[in-house]
Amino acid sequence: MGVPGPGTRLGIFVPSSNSNAETLTASILAGQPDLGVHYSRFRLPPSLDDPVDLGVLGEAPALLNDADPHAIAFHGTSGSWTGITSDRTLCAELAAMCGAPATTASVAVVEALGALSATRIGLVFPGPGFIAAGIQREFSRHGLEVQSVSVPLAALSNPEIARLDTAAIDAMMCPAFVPGLDAVVCVGTNLRSGYLVEGFEQEFGIPVVDSAIATLWHLLHLAGVSRPIPGWGTLLAAT
């Protein structure tokens, strides 16, 4: 008889103010008893412009590595404006430290868009417009053309983003759906848009890449897990 419980261990670094990562991931994997997810938390730097590196993660990688994960992910999107290339460097450093392949939410989004052959995108970002403009510039360096941008009317803290209800998320996302897009991307892993992806795809007829879902999608691929998980949009349904 095999060892009871999950045989594949996934590791995720979660910003301390994020309350969406664990709950969304658990909801998606509720029917996947062979997959276990283990978390380590860290505190984000005070400025959105500050990149996340090993110094910011502190003890989190070493603590998570004690669980011997098969693949690991940084559940944050700061690389989408501070530099996806820097995020790939962080992935390499984490892989060397933990002995397992690594990704970040920003890298995962780019990989997901590539898998969907999506280059003309609408952007939803639950933060300030100047950061969204930075995401647009960074995406353009990676062959992604942002054709629409939607941000909230007022500044929101990370806990406030997590408390947005369905109507508020809907109001933020709908303006991003303009003609001629290949996909709409939600950058912000504390925005609970992942629960609404399937409905938006059915309404507008194009894929929606939620950064939290993309993180799990890429993490599964890195762990060698390939299976469709229906109910959460095109990306996971095609895994």
Image (cartoon, grey):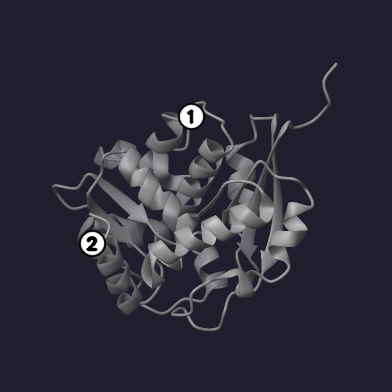
Tell me, yes or no, if residue 190 can be seen here: no
- Residue flagged by tag 2: what amino acid is it? Ser
Q: Residue 116 carries which label?
A: none
What residue is shown with label 1? 230
Badge 2: how crowded within 10 Å, few (<14), some, or many (20+)? Answer: few
**Quadrant that contains the N terminus:** top right
Q: Is mark 1 on a helix, strand or loop?
A: loop
Task: Give the image location of residue 25, x and y in percent.
Answer: 60, 46
Task: Give the image location of residue 233, x and y in percent.
Answer: 41, 37
- 54 or 176, which lies in front? 54
In this rendering, the label closer to the viewer, 1 or 2: 2
Tell me, yes or no, if residue 147 can be seen here: yes
Residue at horizontal 34%, vertical 53%?
A: 185
Residue at horizontal 70%, vertical 29%?
A: 34
Q: What element carries label 2?
A: helix
Badge 1: how crowded within 10 Å, few (<14), some, or many (20+)? Answer: some
| Residue 134 image-quadrant placement | bottom left
Task: Give the CA separation, mark 1 to mark 2.
Answer: 31 Å
Residue at horizontal 48%, vertical 61%?
A: 89
Q: How many circles with numbers are drawn on the protein? A: 2
- 158 or 131, which lies in front? 131
Task: Give the image location of residue 178, x and y in percent.
Answer: 18, 53
